[in-house]
Image (cartoon, rainbow, N blue to C red):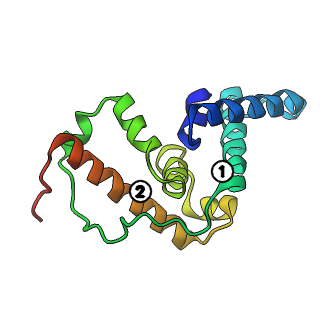
Amino acid sequence: MYAVCLRYARSSSDAADILQEGFVKVFTKLEQFQFQGSFEGWVRRIMVNTALRAYQRQRFDYETTGHETLPESPVEPDAVASLSEAELLRLISRLPDGYRVVFNMVAIEGYSHAEVAELLGIQESTSRSQLTKARRWLCEQFETLHQITPQKS
C-alpha cells in the first residue's frame, strides 16, 4: 500500500503520512467491510481516497508547467519497454501534481474521466487535458533519458 501512496504523494514522508492516515481509516471502518470483493481492493480504495484528499488539501488550482505547447510525437515502443519499473515510477513521481494524480487515477487505477472529475471537483475535459499533458511530459522524459528521436508519421 505504501507504493500506492507514494504514487500520489510529493515525497516519501508525505506518502508515509497518507499511509498512516489510510490505515487509521481502515481500522476504524473495518466493520464496514462487507466481504464483497477482495479485502486488498477495499484497502487500496481507502488509500487512494485518502491520498486524493491529501492532494486536494494542497493542490494548486491552475497548474502550468510550460509543457502545453509540446508537439505530440509518438515514442518508439522499445523506449518504454527498456525502462525498469523503478525508472518508470521515478518518472511518474516527477510529474507535476495535477498531472501525476490524474495519470495515476486513469492510467494506473483505471478510473474514468467522469469519476476523476467527480472525485477531484474538476471538469472531465480538465481530467482529459491533464492526462494528455502528463503523457506528453513522460514522452519528453523518455526521449531525454534514452536519446530517442520521435517517429515520423
The percent coordinates of residue 105 (x first, y second) are 55, 50
The percent coordinates of residue 102 (x first, y second) are 53, 55
Residue assigned mark 1: 55
In the rendered structure, which amino acid carries the disc numbered 2?
Ala
The percent coordinates of residue 23 (x first, y second) are 77, 28
Compare residues 103 and 114 and report the one nearer the observer: 103
139 left or right, relative to 103: left
> Can you say whether 1 is above or below 109 in the image?
above
> Can you say whether 12 is above or below 76 in the image?
above
Inter-mark Cα distance, 2 to 1: 17 Å
Compare residues 50 and 114 and report the one nearer the observer: 50
How many residues crowd mark 1 within 10 Å: few (<14), some (14–19), many (20+)? some
Element class at badge 1: helix
Q: Is residue 37 visible?
A: no
144 left or right, relative to 121: left
**Residue positioned 29% across, 48% down in the render:** 141
Q: Quadrant of residue 114?
A: bottom right
**Residue positioned 34% across, 50% down in the render:** 138
Q: Quadrant of residue 124?
A: bottom right
Q: Are marks 2 and 1 in contact (CB under 8 Å)?
A: no
153 left or right, relative to 114: left
> Can you say whether 19 is above or below 142 in the image?
above
The percent coordinates of residue 116 (x first, y second) are 61, 59
3 left or right, relative to 41: left
Give the quarter of the figure containing the N terminus: top right
Residue assigned mark 2: 134
Q: Which mark is residue 146?
A: none
